[in-house]
């Protein structure tokens, strides 16, 4: 394991399209956990790598869009910082509060980084599910090549380390996949610690929502990026803090409530939902 965290973390790894984000988000809201979404820290990690002089991170920023995505698969994988970001995720989690329990998910979460104990599982899509979900994303050839490379790379490491996996074959619902992951993590979920009040849960939703806002702000700050925060609409989690709530609110990134993200900031609520206690 690359580094050690002196606390319990629930880890969900897997390639793009496996359903990691949906499952982790659902479990976090249901149980009162802090959800750490590795995708939300992509550009923060890239900036950290650039500051450290990482050549592949620097190269990615310097290339044009056309040059970047026409690179061979091995180069795309290297420029994705797939291996380097695992260590950055560990650093991020060390900086978070000791409670509540964290559920962390993302493509860079791999067996060499987090180990293969009872707190980790990898969601691996079947070949058919992989083809279907990647087709639904309508990816250009370059990103499609990278995603396929990540499928092979992650699957190989899971096999090499004998890590625990759940095959997503498309026959079960997302809720059923989440239930299977909950069963694997049952002992730790029972032990906690978890958020116990609606107010605490609401602030955890704000934490996850703010991470998404920062992700897009950092992306649009790139000189080569397209779009802006005023026109990009995202689905943000309702911050009512009720464990059964799965409602989202669609807003542009620019319209998300500004900081501070504490008791002074009113929660973002879906229609008909009441503020947390």
Image: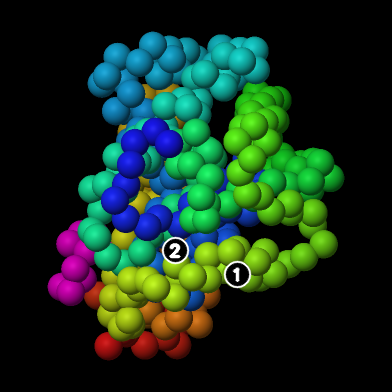
Local SS, label 1: helix
Q: Residues within 10 Å of mark 1 (few under 14, many from 20)?
A: few
Local SS, label 2: strand
Q: Is residue 53 above or below residue 242?
A: above
Locate residue 194, reporting x and y percent: 35, 73
**Label of residue 43 in the image:** none
Q: Residues within 10 Å of mark 2 (few under 14, many from 20)?
A: many
Question: Which of the colour schemes (rainbow, by chain, secondary structure, one colour) is used?
Answer: rainbow
- At x 82%, y 62%, the residue is 171
Q: Is residue 188 magenta?
A: no
Q: Nearer the viewer, residue 23 or 258?
A: 23
- At x 43%, y 15%, the residue is 56
**Predominant SS along the magenta part:** loop
Closer to the eye: label 2 or 1: 1
Q: Nearer the viewer, residue 34 or 237?
A: 34
Quadrant position of residue 114: top left
Residue numbers of the magenta segment: 255-265
Q: Quadrant of the N terminus?
A: top left
Q: Is residue 264 magenta?
A: yes
Q: Earlier in the sequence, mark 2 or mark 1?
A: 1
Locate residue 63, reporting x and y percent: 47, 13
Visible in this render: residue 256?
A: no
Q: Nearer the viewer, residue 59 or 150?
A: 150
Visible in this render: residue 4?
A: yes
Locate residue 204, reporting x and y percent: 33, 67
Residue tagged 2: 236
Quadrant position of residue 276: bottom left
Q: Is residue 235 above or below residue 49?
A: below
- At x 63%, y 49%, the residue is 164
Residue tagged 1: 183
């Amino acid at each position: 394991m690359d580094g050690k965290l002196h606390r319990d973390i629930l880890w969900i790894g897997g390639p793009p399209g496996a359903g990691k984000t949906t499952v982790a988000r659902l479990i976090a809201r249901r149980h009162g956990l802090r959800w750490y979404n590795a995708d939300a820290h992509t550009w923060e990690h890239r900036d950290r790598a650039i500051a450290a002089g990482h050549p592949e991170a620097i190269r990615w920023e310097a290339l044009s869009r056309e040059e970047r995505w026409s690179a061979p698969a091995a180069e795309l994988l290297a420029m994705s910082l797939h291996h380097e970001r695992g260590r950055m995720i560990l650093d991020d989690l060390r900086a978070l509060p000791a409670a509540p329990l964290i559920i962390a998910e993302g493509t860079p979460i791999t067996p060499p980084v987090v180990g293969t104990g009872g707190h980790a599982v990898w969601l691996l899509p079947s070949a058919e599910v992989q083809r279907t979900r990647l087709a639904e994303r309508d990816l250009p050839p370059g990103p499609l090549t990278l995603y396929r490379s990540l499928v092979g790379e992650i699957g190989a490491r899971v096999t090499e380390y004998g890590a625990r996996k759940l095959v997503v074959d498309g026959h079960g619902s997302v809720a059923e996949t989440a239930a299977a992951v909950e069963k694997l993590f049952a002992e730790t979920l029972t032990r906690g610690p978890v958020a116990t009040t609606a107010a605490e849960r609401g602030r955890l939703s704000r934490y996850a929502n703010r991470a998404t806002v920062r992700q897009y702000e950092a992306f649009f700050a790139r000189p080569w990026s397209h779009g802006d925060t005023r026109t990009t609409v995202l689905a943000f989690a309702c911050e009512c803090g009720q464990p059964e709530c799965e409602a989202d609110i669609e807003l542009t990134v620019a319209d998300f409530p500004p900081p501070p993200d504490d008791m002074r900031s009113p929660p973002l609520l879906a229609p008909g939902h009441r503020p947390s206690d």
